[in-house]
Image (cartoon, grey):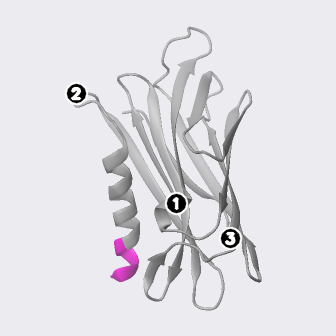
Amino acid sequence: MRLMTAPVMVAAAALTVLPTAATSSAASNTATTLFPLDGPNQLETHAFLNCVTSDGHCDFVVGADMRTPDGVTGFPPGLWARQTTEIRSPNRLAYLDVHGSGQYERVMKSMGSDEVTTVYFGEGPPDKYQTTGRVDSTDWTTGQPKTDVSVIVCTHIQVVYGGVNITSPATCAQTSFS
């Protein structure tokens, strides 16, 4: 039961910081992946995506933490980590304009997908290792919000500290505007 509590708490925390209009409809999805780290510890990555139809935007939160036998924690001292997050749509007529909000982030834009790279340094609580952002969906042909598409957010992270150098598998959340 304790293993299920943390992902639910992370998703609930993400919901509390994401703005949505009271009268607009939205669709959301959450994904979590666990990967062996060191000894009994696991690397946990998560992705949350919430798309709002009224103005054609999505909010996302991606992050990582360490899951120990005692629960979710941050990472130890000496950490260097690089998280890469790809945002795309299977619909080629959707232009997704991605904006990140972190201090050590870079957004690389391309025709089919955008990629957010975030670098983390040092120890800290689990919420230190999160990236939040916004995706605006626009129709290439009209310039208007495009809400008849699905949006996919996939993230993975490379974690390096004291004898550990591991890259997680991708964790992906996908939803459509409702």
Q: Which mark is residue 79?
A: 3
Q: CA distance from mark 1 to mark 3?
A: 12 Å
Relative placement, left or right, of 1 versus 40 is: left
Q: CA distance from mark 2 to mark 3?
A: 43 Å
In reply to whether residue 115 is colored magenta, the answer given is: no
Residue range corresponding to the magenta coloring: 1-5
Residue 157 spot, x, y in % from top left: 67, 61
For the image shown, how many numbered marks are present on the structure? 3
Q: Which mark is residue 13?
A: none
- Toward which corner of the image does residue 78 lie, by quadrant? bottom right
Please report whichever mark, 1 or 3, sits nearer to the chain's N-terminal start. 3
Is the N terminus in the top left, top right, bottom left or bottom right quadrant? bottom left
Residue 149 spot, x, y in % from top left: 51, 30
Q: What element does badge 2 sit on? A: loop
Location of residue 99 with respect to 16 vertically, above or below: above
Q: CA distance from mark 2 to mark 1?
A: 32 Å
Name the residue at 57% across, 45% down: 102
Residue annotated with mark 2: 23
* Residue 158 visible within the image: no
Q: Nearer the viewer, mark 2 or mark 1?
A: 1
The amino acid pointed to by label 1 is Lys
The amino acid pointed to by label 2 is Thr
Residue annotated with mark 1: 128
Q: Residues within 10 Å of mark 3 (few under 14, many from 20)?
A: some
Residue 162 spot, x, y in % from top left: 74, 81
Location of residue 93 with respect to 166 vertically, above or below: above
Pick whichever, 164 or 115, lies toward us: 164
Name the residue at 41% across, 67% down: 7
Pick whichever, 5 or 132, lies toward us: 132
Is the C terminus in the top left, top right, bottom left or bottom right quadrant? top left
The amino acid pointed to by label 3 is Leu
Q: Residues within 10 Å of mark 1 (few under 14, many from 20)?
A: some
